[in-house]
Structures are given as structure tokens and as C-alpha cells.
């Protein structure tokens, strides 16, 4: 049997998708990944075959930098970073205006390339990133059965019947208090973008399959079977009940190569440590990372600090017993971390929950606000606004979560046992196939 995985050329998307392929590979099946050249090293590390597929102009090999993007894309990325410094509403508005550029890039040409790959690979199963809209457009137009993998917070698939609108958070944490006027303006913008996006989807769909029924909301379109890379326990029951057929798999933990230096650091002290990472995009916010450094220096802990695209020198004075690198093996460190400080990206959050690590979340963009609110509501995280949080507030939040460290293994069983998600995804698909 052959599994085809379709992913954007972004490490944060490819890692969880590639990880679920392990269940197929471990059964002796062939795994092929269709993605771009920037993440070829990840495909190779899993031992999979690759088909080249560009789903957008930008790429992210693991740490994104504006100066490494194609002309035009670099300015978009800088604009996004600037928007995060202005705040929640400004960031969400910037992302909404960029949506056609981000998510519907050359849809007909891309869709035809996807169908060429399917014809060449002849897969028995297909797993596609939910945000690979052009790929899902191709598969839907051609009537090709596939798994639709939602990697972010489940509201990445909006439910119009619940009044949800793509890009507009239905909930946000207590640390954020946008005005009614701001929210009204943002919702109106998201509605205009949704209509424009849907019109573009329908134009491409008509070219691929003139007989296909038009969509009323392209953001609400989905594949044959939905798999959410997210714990079901954090999604309100009333929302789960109106979802299309689906499976929640908790977290898609990736294997990591042993790192002797990291292992020596882990084994070198009994002092608890805090893991800090703002992921592959938001690590550019050195101003916020520096506040985290200052807060941690006031506590009796070590830190494992992935500074990403920020200059290490911008972080200020670093204690000698900290582990500070551009990139760190996140899964390895989260398994033993006392607390994790994160931007609220879905990989960071679900991987931390897999090991019961308490969280301090500083959300910046997209579905990070809804995800942070869910954690806050469940008592699994302290949430602060990254631009406004002071060093004393960060210290207090981290200290509060450190106090919960002895109870980290008392999280709901499904959260603590989600490391078998590759098997869960495989089992979910086989049950649909029969």
C-alpha cells in the first residue's frame, strides 16, 4: 500500500503530517510526501520519498527569516511581524487581508500539479493538510477520497451553522480585551475576505470541474474524513456534536534524533527547567523573549531556550547553566520540562500536553487566541498578552505553573496518552475504509 502526504513547504506543518506516516511505514507500506524543497531534509529524515510541490511562494525550513524569502514574500513577512507588535486586532486584520495570497496561490496550476502527482504515485491513501486549499480543491474536484488533517485549533475549520467565521476568534483569553468596535470591524473584514476567497475557490473549481456545485463558504469546505491534531477534551461538547465525521488524535509526536549535548545537559542537574520556544515564526520577537529571560532569572530554575531567528545577544544576560540554542529538540525536552513557555502554536501546545507539562502561553496570531482560551478555561495554562506582559507578571505566571509540576501527570488520561496518535490516525482511516 502507498500513502501520499501533501504538505505546504513549512516545517511546522510537515512535522505532524510526516509523523503520522510512521504507522503506515511501520507496517511496511510506502510513504511519499509532496512538498517543497525547503523541507526536503525533513522528508529525508523520516526516510520517505518526495514529490516536489509548491503550495505557495513562501517556505520555512524550521526557522523562518524574511531575508530568505522570495522578493515580495519578504515584505509580507515583515508586515506580519510589525502587526504582531501592534496587537491582536492588527495582527488578525493583517492576516485576513493576506489570506488570498497565503492560502490560494495559483490554484488551478497547483491543483493540476497535485493531480499529476496522484496519477504518478498511485496512492491507496492520501493525507492532506487542511490549509493546503489548492490541493484539497484538486482532490475534491476529481472525486479523490482523502483524509483532511486539521493541524491547528479545530476552529481552523469554521462551522457556519454556529456563526463561526474564518479568521475571527470565537473566543479569546482574559488578557485580551478588544473593544466592540474593533471586533465589529474585524468581523466585517473577515466576512469580505471569506466572500472573496470563496469566489476565487469557485472560479478555480469551475475550471477544474465545470459540473461541480459551487461553494457558499470555501473556508468551511473539508475532505472525506477529518482528523484533528488536537485533544478532544479541550473542545466543548456542543461544538464536537455538530462537526462532520471526524477523529481527534491528541498530538502527532515526531521522532527526534538523539542529541548527546542535550542529553548531558538534561542529566547534569536535578534542578527543574523551563522550556521556552516561540516556534519557527514568532521567535523573531526578541523583545518578548528578553522579558521571559529576565523573569526566569528571578526564579530558581534552569531554562532550555530555543531563540530561533532572534539574535542570542538580544536576549540579555544568560545564566551559565542554561541550554540556549537557535533550535532544540522540542519533544525530547518537553518530556522532562517542569513548565513550557510558548506562543501557543498547536505543535508546542499538543506536545506539551502529551507529557503533562503546564504551560504559560503568550499568543500572537491566528488560532493561538482560541487555543490559549481553551487551555486557560481548562486550567492547563496561564495566558498573558505578549506585548503588555511585564517581567513581574511573567515571573508570577511561570511560578504559578511551577507549583503545578507535581500534578503534571494528573491531566486527563487522553491528554497524557496522545503520543500514540500515528496509530490513532491509521486506525481512524482504516475504520472509514472498512
Image (spheres, rainbow, N blue to C red):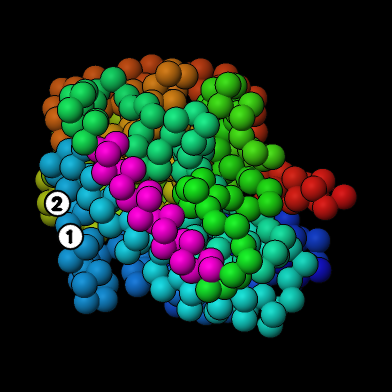
Determine whether, in the image, residue 11 is placed left or right of residue 382: right
Q: Quadrant of the N terminus?
A: bottom right
Q: Separation of disc 1 and disc 2 at Cα?
A: 6 Å
Judge whether residue 170 is colored magenta. Answer: no
Q: Is residue 316 above or below residue 117?
A: above
Q: Determine crowd level at label 1: few under 14, some 14-19, many 20+ residues with C-alpha closer than 10 A.
A: few
- Residue at image mark 1: 78
Residue 294, picture quadrant = top left
What is the magenta segment's predominant secondary structure?
helix
Q: Position of residue 230 (x, y in %)?
A: 55, 38
Q: Give the labeled residue for mark 2.
A: 82
Residue range (magenta): 186-206
User: Toward the viewer: 21 or 355?
Assistant: 21
Asked if residue 304 can be seen in this view, the reply is: no
Q: Secondary structure at mark 2?
A: helix
* Nearer to me, 352 or 114: 114
Q: Which percent across, then down, holds residue 104?
A: 41, 64
Residue 234: horizontal and vertical position, in percent? 53, 26
Q: Residue at x 53, y 68 (%)?
A: 206
**Residue sitting at x 35%, y 72%:** 57
Q: Position of residue 277 (x, y in %)?
A: 33, 45
Residue at (34, 69) in percent of width and height = 58
Q: Residue at (44%, 26%) from the top-left corner?
A: 374
Give yes or no for residue 199 being in the magenta stretch. Answer: yes
Asked if disc 1 and disc 2 are in contact, CB closer than 8 Å, the reply is yes
Within 10 Å of disc 2 (Cα), the crowding (few <14, some 14-19, many 20+) is some
Amino acid at each position: 500500500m502507498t500513502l501520499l502526504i501533501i504538505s505546504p513547504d513549512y516545517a511546522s506543518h510537515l512535522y505532524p503530517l510526516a509523523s503520522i506516516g510512521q504507522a503506515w511505514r511501520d507496517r511496511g507500506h510506502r510513504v511519499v510526501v509532496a512538498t517543497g524543497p525547503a523541507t526536503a531534509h525533513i522528508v529525508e529524515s523520516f526516510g520517505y520519498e518526495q514529490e516536489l510541490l509548491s503550495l505557495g511562494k513562501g517556505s520555512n525550513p524550521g526557522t523562518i527569516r524574511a531575508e530568505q524569502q522570495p522578493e515580495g514574500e519578504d515584505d509580507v513577512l515583515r508586515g506580519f511581524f510589525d502587526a504582531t507588535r501592534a496587537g491582536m486586532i492588527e495582527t488578525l486584520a493583517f492576516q485576513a487581508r493576506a489570506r488570498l495570497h497565503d492560502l490560494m496561490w495559483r490554484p488551478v496550476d497547483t491543483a493540476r500539479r497535485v493531480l499529476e502527482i496522484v496519477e504518478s504515485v498511485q496512492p491507496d491513501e492520501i493525507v492532506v493538510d487542511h490549509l493546503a486549499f489548492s490541493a484539497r480543491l484538486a482532490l475534491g474536484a476529481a472525486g479523490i477520497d482523502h483524509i483532511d488533517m486539521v493541524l491547528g485549533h479545530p476552529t481552523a475549520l469554521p462551522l457556519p451553522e454556529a456563526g463561526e467565521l474564518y479568521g475571527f476568534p470565537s473566543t479569546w483569553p482574559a488578557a485580551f480585551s478588544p473593544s466592540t468596535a474593533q471586533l465589529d470591524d474585524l468581523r466585517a473584514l473577515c466576512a469580505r475576505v471569506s466572500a472573496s476567497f470563496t469566489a476565487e475557490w469557485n472560479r478555480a473549481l469551475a475550471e477544474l470541474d465545470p459540473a461541480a456545485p459551487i461553494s457558499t463558504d470555501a473556508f468551511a469546505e473539508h475532505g472525506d474524513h477529518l482528523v484533528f491534531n488536537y485533544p478532544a477534551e479541550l473542545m466543548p461538547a456542543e461544538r464536537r456534536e455538530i462537526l462532520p465525521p471526524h477523529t481527534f488524535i491528541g498530538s502527532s509526536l515526531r521522532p527526534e534524533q538523539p542529541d548527546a549535548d542535550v542529553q548531558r545537559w538534561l542529566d547534569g542537574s536535578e534542578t527543574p527547567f523551563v522550556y521556552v520556544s516561540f516556534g519557527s515564526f514568532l521567535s523573531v520577537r526578541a523583545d518578548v523573549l528578553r522579558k521571559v529571560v529576565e523573569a526566569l532569572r528571578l526564579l530558581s530554575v534552569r531554562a532550555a531556550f530555543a531563540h530561533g531567528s532572534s539574535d542570542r545577544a538580544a536576549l540579555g544576560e544568560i545564566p551559565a547553566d542554561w541550554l540556549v540554542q537557535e533550535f532544540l529538540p522540542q519533544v525530547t525536552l518537553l518530556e522532562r520540562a517542569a513548565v513550557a513557555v510558548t506562543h501557543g502554536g498547536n505543535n508546542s501546545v499538543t506536545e506539551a500536553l502529551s507529557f503533562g507539562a503546564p504551560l504559560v502561553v503568550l499568543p500572537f496570531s491566528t488560532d493561538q487566541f482560541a487555543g490559549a482560551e481553551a487551555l486557560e478555561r481548562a486550567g492547563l495554562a496561564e495566558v498573558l498578552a505578549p506585548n503588555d506582559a511585564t517581567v513581574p507578571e511573567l515571573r508570577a505566571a511561570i511560578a504559578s505553573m511551577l507549583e503545578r509540576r507535581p500534578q503534571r501527570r494528573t491531566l486527563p488520561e487522553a491528554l497524557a496518552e496522545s503520543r500514540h496518535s500515528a496509530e490513532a490516525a491509521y486506525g481512524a482511516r482504516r475504520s472509514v475504509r472498512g
